Amino acid sequence: MAKRIDITNVSSYYGKFEAVSDVSLRIEPNAVTAFIGPSGCGKSTLLRTLNRMHEVVPGTSVTGEILLDGENIYDDTVDPVNVRRTIGMVFQRPNPFPTMSIYENVAAGIRLDARRMPKSELDGLVERSLQAANLWNEVKDRLKKPGASLSGGQQQRLCIARAIAVEPAVLLMDEPCSSLDPISTLAIEDLIDELKNNYTIVIVTHNMQQAARVSDTTAFFNLAGIGQPGRLIESAPTALIFSTPGQKATEDYISGRFG
Amino acid sequence: MTKLGAGVPDSIQGSVVRRGDLVFRRLAKGAGLAVLVVLAAIAGFLVWRSVPGLRANTANFLTSTAWFPDQSPSRFGIAAIAFGTVVTAALALLIAVPIGFGVALFIAFYAPPKLATALGFIVDLLAAVPSIIFGLWGLQVLMPHLGGLQRWLNDHLGFIPIFHNSLGIYTKSLFVAAVVLGVMVLPTVSAISREIFLKVPHSNVEAALALGATRWETMRMAVLPFSRPGMISAAMLGLGRALGETIAVALILSALNVVNWHVTEPGGNTFAANIALGWNEAGPIGLSALIASGLVLFVLTLVVNVVARSIIWRRAEFHEGL
Amino acid sequence: MTTLTLATGHLQGRRLPRAAAPATALVAAALAVLLGQISPVSGVAGTTCVAVVLFFAGYTALSFAVEGSRHAIDRLASTLIYASFLAALVPLVWILSTVLVRGGRVLSAGFLGHSMRGIGADATGGGVYHALVGTIEQVLLATVIAVPIGVLTAIYLVEYGRHSKLSKAIGFFVDVMTGVPSIIAGLFVYSAFIVSLGFQRTGLAGALALSILMIPVVVRSTEEMLKIVPSELREAAYALGVPKWRTILRVVIPTAIGGITTGVMLAIARISGETAPLLLTTFLSQSINFNPTSGPQASIPTFVWDQIGSATHPALDRAWAGALVLILFVAVLYTTARLIAWVTGGARR
């Protein structure tokens, strides 16, 4: 059940340092939104504020409002554990739990909520999640093997399977292909295209071709200089932003003149 | 005037290894070997010097509870002191291991990172307190305070044999010694497990949080399984310390060589305490007998330490391979 | 197809207000005091224990009722983890404050300036001077023996023997040696030097035993310090044609000297409180003996041991004062070590 995210006047801080300033943006359900921009522009920080992972680092803070289908995820009555459960995340480097098997990795999140789920039901869920992550055929005969025994690209798809096994509404991806080879990258990109049928997807990438290939909407972030906060410069349908960018800075970045 | 290049040797040939290097290298290697030699010499001399006592012994060294090596005929055995050593060390671990892991988790994951180093330093201070001071404190300050607890254990849990106390005296017991040992072992367990916890990949902690795990679920999912071997060896190194601790135990126990499961009753003795307390009154055979018991303690702690260190070393190589 | 029974999409979660923890603590404390009036568990220690148990139970139950089982378990775990840290502080504060108070009553210039010669166990007066002399000499001797061996071993492990089987074996057994009980070092020195070679029980014999305990600590700390010397420094020296041994002595060691000194000071602090090995090797003595190579020599730890053994009031007072002197001795070493580390920036611990 994909959900819409409405970001209004959001700023994220590390201590006193403002990493992202005053972002307002709508993220549509069943679509892929890409965050692009030079390093330090705050795109990853903004991504982490969307599922309240930003506050895991001590001393951080967020102002503004983020609505998930109209519900403010920073409301006092909201449990951050439920937010992260509803908004899944895939990280830059594949990070399967090294002590767990492939099966246990996928089941890890499910077991938190439903400790006494019948084995058959759990088996079905693990299989469906691995199928949805396009990994089932490669691992179905070795589910008991450690997750770390897979190749980098397979590990990243395992992490995607782990994230979607708890049936989130949104999937956040923080440069999910940056440590992968081109073939694995292609597999993940195909997967993203399939996943948007069921989820809202936000992907941070430093690779503009990737943004052009996978996303429906692109948001470009930039910073005025070192020590300055990152800002949202513009956001538009991907086809539009790559053909006729509205801002000079976007055009410079996309055409490779800086960044 | 010196010509430029006058210092350049005519040829780059020369002995392949310079003499200075050779001497220094051998010196360094010799020092390293000395460490191994010392360990071997400890074993060698203890074996050699325990022979006269073991020859004179008319009792079974392993099963006798008597300790009268200087009587004739000489009779001594380690059953009672081995019992006391193992019981106090085990009880000490029951106290030190859970609290030590708790302290390590607190410093590694729960405390504010800015304070963590300072808080860790404070706990490490406990390791810097000399054992004679633990003994003095245990004997003079803690022991009177533990009377009530031991009485309560007897009154309410006395049906469990180890808490039963038929004497009504609650001083100088194995229980008191074990509590002091527990406090002494605590910094060992917490310092080593803290280092193990700090090696847990941060990305796994984040992965667990992002799945919607609570903080404790994150520990169970990403931290504890990864750290299990290290935690086991931290507990074992604590065990090694508890087995060999001398002075604090010697001051607290009444040095009665008996096997008594009622740990809150006075009496009981350990390898190390028996040596410290018996040393100055022992005759030649008595000294040899004490050395023989020391040899057993040495082997015991050596085995515990070798196993614990092997786990850590294998783990370290595994990390380098990652 | 089975559908997930999980509660998807409910961001709201009933959470306990911030005031819940202190409020529960207050209620638990009040209940414990009340219970203390009617039950056999009373006194400060008993009431505290009851209050703590009541707090754990009450807080967890409250969380379970409001937030559900997952958060209740999380809160219980957090409470236990915080509590274990506080529990570890209790003995530290308790011991240090007792030593300060009871030792401070007796400690005086006279205590530091006099020996125990001619002072009976029942008499007041006397002091720790002879023991201070002994401890300083024994610790210095042990340092003179242990530091060259320890530092050279570390140099072998880091500079020469890297990845060789021998250096792995040495490194492993150095770790194992840190776990050898201190009394074993005393037994070894006794059986090797006193029985087998016919030496007396002297301060030197005690220093030998202490050096065995000190070597592994020096090796480990020096090794850590040598490892963080950047290899570019070594390569720069090699490129200038400086032989390896001179590079180590002139470049590597001076770079790491701050950290090495800190490690040595901490090792000294560790051994200066050792009692068991000295009991077996130096004997007890009530008189001043400046010569560590002849005759029994006192030390602060064995002085405290001796006074506890006498068990009279004046003797126990002296024991506490001796304990305070020992703590101060160790504290000075610790502080100096940290200062050196701080000034040179050579150690990050």
Image (cartoon, coloured by chain):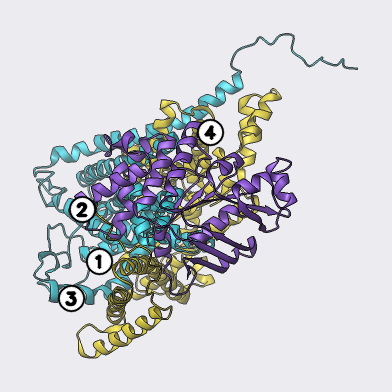
Chain colours: A purple, B cyan, C yellow
Kind of residue indicated by mark 2 = Val
Q: Is residue C55 above or below residue A10?
A: below
Q: Which mark is residue B176?
A: 1
* Residue, disc 3: B151
Helix or strand or loop: what does disc 3 sit on? helix
Q: CA distance from mark 2 to mark 1?
A: 14 Å
At mark 1, the secondary structure is: helix
- CA separation, marks 4 and 2? 39 Å
x and y percentages locating residue B149 in the rendered image: 22, 74
Q: Badge 4 sits on which subunit?
A: C
Q: Position of residue B172 (x, y in %)?
A: 22, 67
Left or right, C266 with respect to B192, comes to right
Q: Which mark is residue B86?
A: 2
Q: Is residue B102 above or below residue A39?
A: below
Task: Specify few, some or many for label 4: CA neighbours under 10 Å numbering under 14, 14-19, or 20 or more.
Answer: many
Decide which of tag 2 and tag 1 comes sooner along the chain.
Answer: 2
Q: What amino acid is at disc 3?
A: Arg
Residue type beneath disc 1: Val
Task: Kindly check if marks 3 and 2 are in contact, taking CB atoms under 8 A apart as contact.
Answer: no
Residue C19 vs residue B29, the one in the foreground: C19
Find numbered disc 4 in the image and state the secondary structure of the residue it sits on.
helix
Residue marked by disc 4 = C155
Chain assignment, label 1: B
Q: Identify the amino acid type marked 4.
A: Ile
Residue C183 at least partly seen: no
Cα separation, mark 1 vs mark 3, equals 12 Å
